[in-house]
Amino acid sequence: MRLKGIFLMKKITVILFIFFVSFSIGITKTQSDTSQDISERNKEADKYQPGFYLIAAEADSAAALPTPSAGQQVVLYDYKFLQVTERGKPRYLLLPKNADVPLILASNPELQKKGANGFPELRLELTPEAAGMLERLTREHLGGKVAFMIDGEPVTIHKIRSVITGGQFHLSRCTDTACQYIYGRLVKKE
């Protein structure tokens, strides 16, 4: 009888050992999975770096664009952040996957309910390094176009008419909710 009790205790000990090892592996795997999830989310966030992207081509359809290279992407510009009177027909843009000028702010953006033209206005100031990159980009691509992107979406597109120096600019044609949305996205990213 005593032998059966010892055998039963050993069996319970083995079962408990297997349970705890399995449980520990499960916890480790869960922590590893969580770290991997965070890492993937960070990569995804990096993929949508806010900034200025030089437009390589634009067309009425994605099929009408040149085939993107490995370093390029196609995005739809639907004017949703602009006032209704400023909107045009949606356009497909061929852009680099990484910002030509990352949006690295020197200070918090300023949101004004009413700018000089009567519409909401968002004032932004780049760091000296980013301002230098913007100046080089605009100097080298006069007459070209750039897309200002946040979260993988083109907010505005601009023809480069002059060299932009100083790194200060503002968005002034956005809708009330769009300026607030952009402001929220930028403040959240800092």
Image (cartoon, rainbow, N blue to C red):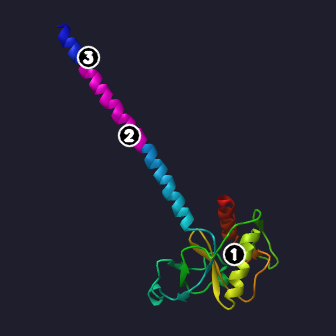
Q: Quadrant of the N terminus?
A: top left
Residue 25 on the magenta span: yes
Say whether disc 2 or disc 3 marks the residue closer to the N-terminus.
Answer: 3
Report how far apart the C-alphas of labels 2 and 1 lie in the structure.
Answer: 49 Å
Q: Quadrant of the C terminus?
A: bottom right
Residue holding disc 3: 9
Looking at the picture, tell me which residue is in the foreground, 40 or 124: 40
Marker disc for residue 26: 2
Q: Amino acid at mark 2?
A: Gly
Q: Residue at x 25, y 19 (%)?
A: 10
- The location of residue 146, given as percent across then percent down, is 64, 82
Of tags 3 and 1, the one toward the viewer is 3
Residue 176: x percent and y percent?
A: 70, 70
Counting residues from the start of the chain, the first of labels 3 and 1 encountered is 3
Reply above or below: 176 against 184: below
Q: Residue furthest top?
A: 2
Quarter of the rendering containing residue 46: bottom right
> Where does residue 134 sit, x and y in percent of width and height?
71, 78
- Taking the view exactly as shown, the residue that stands out farthest to the bottom is 143
Magenta-tinted stretch: 9-29
Position of residue 179 measured from the top left corner of the image (x, y, whole percent) = 70, 69
Report which residue position mark 1 lands on. 174
Query: Is residue 16 part of the magenta span, yes or no?
Result: yes
Residue drawn at x 61%, y 79% is: 79
